[in-house]
Amino acid sequence: MTTRKNQVRKRDMSFANRTMTKIWQEIPSEQNPYLAEACRCHGYDILELAQKRSFSEVLFLLFQGELPTPEQARMLEFLFVSMINPGPRHPATRAAMNAGVGKTTPAHILPIGLNALGSEYLGGQEVEAAIRFFRKNLRDSPNALVAECLKGERPHKGDWHIVPGFGSRFGEIDPMPLKIIALLRTKGSGQAISWGCSFAEALKPYGMGWLSTGVVAAVLSDLGFLPQTGAGLFQLICAPGILAHGLELTNKPISAMPFLDEEHYVIEPESRKK
Amino acid sequence: MLSNLNLAKSDTFFWDEKRGVIRTRKGGWIPGEAVYCHGFDMMENLVGQASYFQVLVLNATGRLPERRLADWLEAYFVCNSYPDARIWCNQVGSLFGTMRATPVSAISAGILASDSKMYGPGTIKAGVKFFVDAVAKKRGGISVEEIVLSCQRGPRAKPVILGYARPVANGDERIEAMERVTKKLGFEHGEHLSLAFDIEKIMLEKTKEQMNALAYVLPFLCDQGFSVQEIYCLLAALVYAGVIACYAEAADQPPESFFPLHCEDIDYQGKPPRPVPA
């Protein structure tokens, strides 16, 4: 009898015998092939890099295969410092803080916060989408595009991210991304930052502008990073702040953060009893 | 609810109303009184009476399903519990085990790995959209063949439909197993699932690709009235048991002994050695 089970056939696929990488080379020890005697990042000895280059330069090298120019390195360094902490009110940081005060294993704090920061809203997935948005629209008129986007449906409640990386935050233009982008422009901005500034200016009358995700996306785009790197790099950039806030609470009592009383945790009557 | 307002209002009333308070229709714990869960007293009405999967559906959707639907869902979780360390999410579990990570982090990471465009819960959104759209098209008078052909990426290309191609194998042993469960529990094939089988006939003709479990389960759950987001929530932890099997085995062995690699087991194809410029 023919059944679905015996109709299952393994595909004639060939899988790699060895995993390939262009990033990292490990030179085996002569005594033990499991141990590396030396490590090279895109051809550069990692210990030589450690002596001669900064963290952000080597980070750029890891993802792009070449060391950055001094201007690129300054832009990336500025981004890493200015965005180092989403702050203790950001939901991703709060997730880490909740885990911290809840006495999770400290090693879990960062992954918890970073998972939240990988999200579609003000998170890594929005950065990725914003890089794609820049790549697609940089040749279009910002004013015409804003006019087109405004025809879309605005959420009746809450904020509107009219396109990835741009919108309102708590009903207004978020001032911090605006200040960061203004400083970035003094360091020599690329096409995405310049175009984004025009786009933000056209959005201004509608109470919208740069979001933090848009700023990160514009810088990464101008530095030549691919869209798919956006989510993870945003997580990496914000990781120190998230971890610091989470760890700050691990040694504090559980009473160090709000645990709402019943007056402020309101269970709707229909949910109490059928 | 969406409206077409062009001008943003800069007042913060919407957020002010929510500041310092959590309002919920889900439930919560009133110490000394009860744990309320969607109108049920959890300890009185659910514990020992409802199955875990009934409560899972209740918490995800706000609706307590009949027991047979929860049992069906549990059977599908069993279907996705392959203890095979070659499967991508499961190998994550093994690697966590060999590193002596905690089982909780291994399970979390394995589930995250399965949130994939290729397999696992990450395929649900696109999969449900296809079947919901396909049913709408069929109701609108479009033939099954036309629905399939609309999934061609070029005039001569074979149609590609999520749920009708499976990594590594063609065909899916889980469908036969779930069909047994479906019949045993007394479920009929609804509009979405019937269409899924009709699509398979055309796909077999045109591409020789059989349906996989996704093309069985998603239409079934659509027929049961679940939304795409509800299905995503219900199936989020689908691979949990397979991951934990692989974690447990690796964690039982000496550290770093799971599938170890020589330096030469990595195929370096990058730049040759070069000095760091000054």
Image (tube, helix red, strand yellow):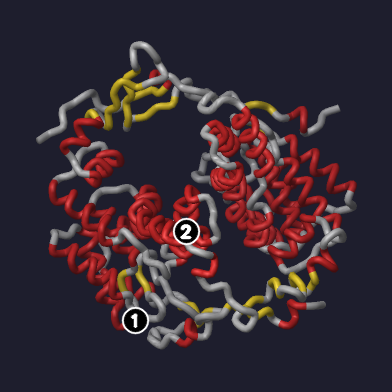
Q: Which residue is mark 1?
A: A207
Assign the N terminus of chain B to one quadrant of the image.
Answer: bottom right
What's under tag 2, amino acid-wise?
Answer: Asn
Residue A188's x, y, as percent? 13, 59
Q: Which mark is residue A74?
A: none
State if disc 2 and disc 1 touch (CB < 8 Å): no
* Kind of residue sitting beneath label 1: Gly
Q: Looking at the picture, how far across and down is residue A30, in whole percent?
A: 34, 12
Residue sitting at 86 percent across and 27 percent down?
A1
Which residue is disc 2 drawn over? Answer: A251
Same chain for labels 1 and 2? Say yes or no: yes
Identify which residue is drawn at 43% across, 75% down: A160
Identified at 71% across, 75% down, the residue is: B30
Quarter location, residue A103: bottom right
Chain letter for the residue marked with disc 2 in the picture: A
Judged from the image, the secondary structure of the residue bearing numbered disc 2 is: loop
Q: Is residue B33 left or right of residue B10?
A: right
B197 vs B50, left or right, is left
Say which of A123 and B117 sits in front.
Answer: A123
Which quadrant of the figure has residue A212?
bottom left
